[in-house]
Image (cartoon, rainbow, N blue to C red):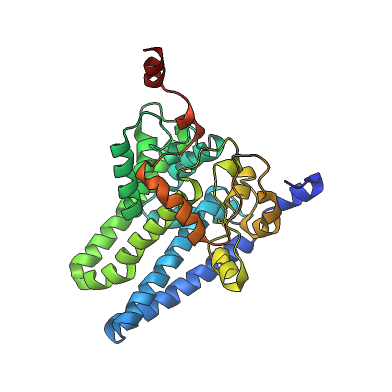
Amino acid sequence: MNPIHKPYLIDLHRRRWSGLWLWLAVVAAFFLAEGLLGWSLLEGPIWLTVLLVLFVAHLMHAHLLAFHEAVHRILCPNRFLNEFVGTAVGTLSFTPFSAFRALHHTHHHHLATERDEELWPFVVPGTPRWQRRLAALFELTLGIVYTPCLCYRFFLRRGSPIRGRTRRRVWLETGLILVWTALVVTAALTGLGRFLLILYVIPGILAGDMHSLRKYIEHMGLAGSTPLGSTRSVVPEGPLGRLVTSSMFNISYHGIHHRYAMIPQERLPELAGWLAPTQADELPTYRHYAGAFRDMVRSLADPRIGAQWLRPTSADVEKVLQ
């Protein structure tokens, strides 16, 4: 990695408004796409409806990445707006914002270790392979359900680190989620079910699956000893690749994000040189997600994450002693 000058590092961490402006652009594109999708559902050809559903799903996924920026408190400099956006997106995606923030904290502080509860159960040696395969199937097909379940598992388990004021806030956010769920169900029962299915439910399921797939591309099957050894990063080539990555809040520069989690998304592309591997277990960057996906997908036969899987277990020691 290139030497870091302290003034430059301080400037990199300065919060900016660009994240909020990007999110507002995503919001505008989302409502425009939803309007076109509604028209297409009534008047347009089926192929246009399918394309618009996929585009809306991408924009919903972008909302989840704005949610991620808000979790890190770097979506914008204003704390109230940061928390408002995070809570709003979390409510609409059935995920309690404060619970996910606490869960994500374990991911950054204990990356790819047994204490990384966002990557549970894939970081826990001894977890039967069939259970890990079942969890992967659930997450990759119903990520919109799996992620809230992961949050509530973390929140409700014995010894949860979510306490006091944060715990009360999670209950309040749960109340908002229940109100939103009730509104969705009521709308479906009043004759809007077809529109809800096409405009919200199907794109939402696809967006949740995009989130899960991206998460797997970033970490599944890796067992490195450093942030760059436990992440896959994509440095896009060409204007289209850069545009798509920008719409995803530059999350593809994932190794940098794990080295410096509080650097706002707009500065990550200028740090691509920091992703050059310096140790044997660190990965080079990929030019596109397809290449990273090909490397990840092989690991789904035995889904696991972390160097702890390489350590001998007590059963292995017993076999040697025998």
Residue at the image position 44 percent from the left and 61 percent from the top: 61
Q: Position of residue 117 (x, y in %)?
A: 44, 36
- In the image: residue 143, left or right of residue 161: left
Viewer-proximal residue among 33 and 220: 220
Residue 85 shows up from this direction = no
Residue 245 shows up from this direction = yes
Number of marks drawn:
0
Q: Is residue 23 above or below residue 8?
A: below
Q: Is residue 305 above or below residue 244?
A: above
- In the image: residue 116, left or right of residue 37: right
Image quarter of the C terminus: top left
Viewer-proximal residue among 111 and 20: 111
Viewer-proximal residue among 317 and 227: 317
Residue at the image position 70 percent from the left and 54 percent from the top: 273
Give the image quarter of residue 77: bottom right
Q: Position of residue 14 (x, y in %)?
A: 70, 52
Residue at the image position 58 percent from the left and 41 percent from the top: 229
Seen as rendered, the residue at the extreme bottom is: 43
Q: Position of residue 183 (x, y in %)?
A: 28, 61
Q: Is residue 218 above or below residue 190?
A: above
Q: Is residue 2 above or below residue 265?
A: above
- In the image: residue 87, left or right of residue 209: right
Viewer-proximal residue among 10 and 252: 252
